[in-house]
Each structure stands twice: as structure tokens, then as C-alpha cells.
Image: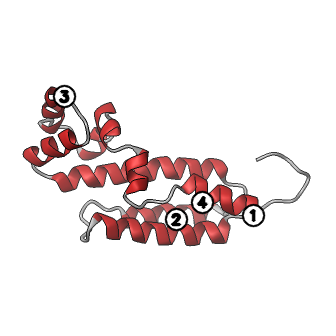
């Protein structure tokens, strides 16, 4: 943010760490529940946290957490698709070409590494995550920060 001559605050390192740890628990790969329930819980927690700490300068922190959270959610999707046939079918459903989808679905790479691939980013875009109910953290922060 720009320097306006006002004294600003920001969350402590401990508060930021606690926020990320809670999001880590909410996006655990072994977590039960539907994807929509998980996204709803994430939305409730992030909205409350941003409403509490939103008056502080933390634009870069929110940006990095939003990027990391999208990565975690892609990982959760990839893990839940579980079987090669399901992975292939879902990749095809989300617009990936047949040959590329087959290669990616049959990979032995781990979940976290797979979510870094260009193919998975094209299949599960930020726009899709928002359509599934995830609130954009950058937008929530901007609304809160500008209203202060």
C-alpha cells in the first residue's frame, strides 16, 4: 500500500502462522466431507480473519496465502479423484486433450508436485475454484482495507 503518513498496523508473525496452520488443517488431504463443505468452512474462517485483521497492511501476505490456498485445493481435488480412470475422466471433463489427460492421469508424481503442472492449472483454474464457492482472498482484503 502507499504511504499516506498514517500509522498502520499489521498482524503478528504468530497470527499469520496460526492462520496458515488452520488453513492447512482445513485443506488436509485426509479430511472427510464434501468439497463444498470444505470450501464453506474455509470461506467462513478466512472472512472472519480478514475482517479482524483487515485494517492492517498485509497485501503481499494475503496474495501469497491465496496462491498457496489455491494450490492446496488443487491438491485436495487431485487426491480425491484417486483412481487413474477418475483422474482421466475429470481432466477430460475440464477441457484437457485426451492424450495429455492420459499422460497426467497415469503419472507417478506426488499430489503436491502434480498441482504445479500446467495441465492441472488449466483444468482447475482460479475461476473454477471461485465458481465452486471459494471467495477470493485478495478481493475480500481489498474490500475490507478500502472500507477502513
- The residue located at (9%, 44%) in the rendering is 84
Rendered image: mark on residue 100: 3
Q: Could you say whether the residue bearing mark 4 is in a helix, strand or loop?
A: helix
- Residue 48's image quarter? bottom right
Work out whether residue 68 or residue 87 is closer to the camera in this orientation and state it: 87
The local crowd at label 3, few if under 14, some if 14 to 19, many if 20 or more residues have their Cα within 10 Å, is: few
Q: State how far apart marks 2 and 4 are (Cα).
A: 15 Å
- The residue located at (63%, 58%) in the rendering is 141
Q: Could you say whether the residue bearing mark 1 is in a helix, strand or loop?
A: helix
Work out whether residue 43 or residue 61 is closer to the camera in this orientation and state it: 43
Q: State how far apart marks 4 and 3 are (Cα).
A: 35 Å
Residue contact between numbered discs 3 and 2, judged by CB atoms under 8 Å: no
Which residue is the site of mark 1?
147
Marked residue nearer the N-terminal end (1 or 4): 4
Residue 10 visible to the viewer: no
Residue contact between numbered discs 2 and 4, judged by CB atoms under 8 Å: no
The local crowd at label 1, few if under 14, some if 14 to 19, many if 20 or more residues have their Cα within 10 Å, is: few
- The residue located at (66%, 63%) in the rendering is 12
Q: State how far apart marks 3 and 2 are (Cα).
A: 36 Å
Rendered image: mark on residue 19: 2
Q: Compared to 70, does 47 lie above or below?
A: below
Residue 42 x, y percent position in the rendering:
44, 66
Residue 68 x, y percent position in the rendering:
45, 49
Marked residue nearer the N-terminal end (3 or 1): 3
Residue contact between numbered discs 1 and 4, judged by CB atoms under 8 Å: no
Which residue is the site of mark 4?
140
Amino acid at each position: 500500500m502507499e504511504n499516506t503518513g498514517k500509522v498502520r498496523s499489521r498482524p503478528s508473525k504468530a497470527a499469520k502462522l496460526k492462520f496458515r496452520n488452520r488453513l492447512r488443517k482445513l485443506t488436509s488431504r485426509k479430511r472427510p466431507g464434501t468439497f463444498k463443505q470444505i470450501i464453506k468452512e474455509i470461506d467462513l474462517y478466512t472472512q472472519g480473519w480478514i475482517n479482524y485483521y483487515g485494517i492492517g497492511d498485509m497485501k503481499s501476505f494475503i496474495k501469497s496465502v491465496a496462491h498457496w490456498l489455491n494450490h492446496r485445493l488443487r491438491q485436495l481435488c487431485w487426491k480425491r479423484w484417486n483412481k487413474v480412470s477418475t483422474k482421466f475422466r475429470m481432466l477430460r471433463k475440464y477441457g484437457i486433450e485426451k492424450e495429455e489427460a492420459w499422460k497426467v492421469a497415469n503419472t507417478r508424481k506426488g499430489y503436491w508436485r502434480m498441482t504445479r503442472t500446467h495441465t492441472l492449472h488449466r483444468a482447475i483454474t482460479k475461476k473454477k475454484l471461485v465458481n465452486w464457492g471459494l471467495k477470493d482472498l485478495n478481493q475480500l482484503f481489498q474490500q475490507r482495507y478500502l472500507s477502513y
